[in-house]
Amino acid sequence: MSFIAPITLKGEHVTLEPLHASHLDGLCAAVKDGELWKLWYTAIPTPDGMKAEIDRRLDLQEKGSMLPFAMRRNDTGMVCGMTTYMHIDALHRRVEIGSTWYAQSAQRTGINTEAKLLLLTHAFETLQCIAVEFRTHWMNQQSRAAITRLGAKQDGILRNHQRLPDGSFRDTVVFSIIESEWKTIKRHLQHKLA
């Protein structure tokens, strides 16, 4: 199996499906739930830009640097967001979990916790990763708090890491979970879901 082979990850609350062009309508509906593209400190596609974003992620998958997923709620069957393994480093067995967004109705429901548990379990136990990284904008307090609640530790801040479309700069906060921490974090996430 390729290090980044597409796979479906299924939990009790959410299923992560390999991203496909057929997810377009569901993702457009999900992003409209909360008008998520209006958040200035993150890059979430508009409904009109969703096809281009799906194409971009699938192109990066083809090049071996991303494994994108559409997330589907198990209770309603509705698509509720996107997430990815990105910045894939097969040689050093590292991935970043990122480019994640959820419909507003899926936020604070346990879906994020379970999706991260599924992704982390696959990364550490199947892909044998030595570290999994998370990155977010310094100003994205909600994301920073969610990453910390997972049990990830802050590694540092990349100052002026990226220039945003409006000309402002993004300071990127970098977090990680390393292999030796995984068993404890897994128990923590399972406890949160119970």
Image (cartoon, rainbow, N blue to C red):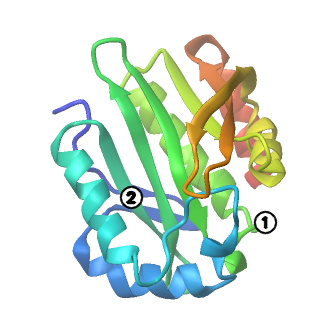
Residue 69, numbered circle = 2
Image quadrant where residue 175 sits? top right
Residue 14 drawn at (x, y percent): 54, 66
- Residue 130 visible within the image: yes
Residue under the point 25% across and 64% down = 55
Whether 175 is drawn above or below 156: the answer is: below
Residue 86 numbered tag: none
Look at the image and tell me whether residue 12 can be seen: no
Q: Is residue 53 left or right of residue 175?
A: left
In this rendering, the answer to whether 140 lies above or below 186 is: below
Q: Amino acid at mark 1?
A: Arg
Which quarter of the picture shows residue 95? top left
Numbered disc 2: secondary structure: strand
Percent of width and height locating residue 16: 43, 60
Position of residue 53 measured from the top left corner of the image (x, y, whole percent):
36, 65
| Residue 108, numbered circle | 1
Dot 1 lies on which element? loop
**In the image, is 159 to the left or to the right of 70?**
right
Percent across and percent down for residue 190 are: 70, 44
Counting other residues with Cα less than 10 Å from the Cα at mark 2, is it few (<14), some (14-19), or many (20 or more)? many
- How many angstroms separate mark 1 from mark 2 (CA)? 20 Å
The N terminus, quarter of image? top left
Q: Amino acid at mark 2?
A: Phe
Lower position in the chain sequence, tag 1 or tag 2: 2
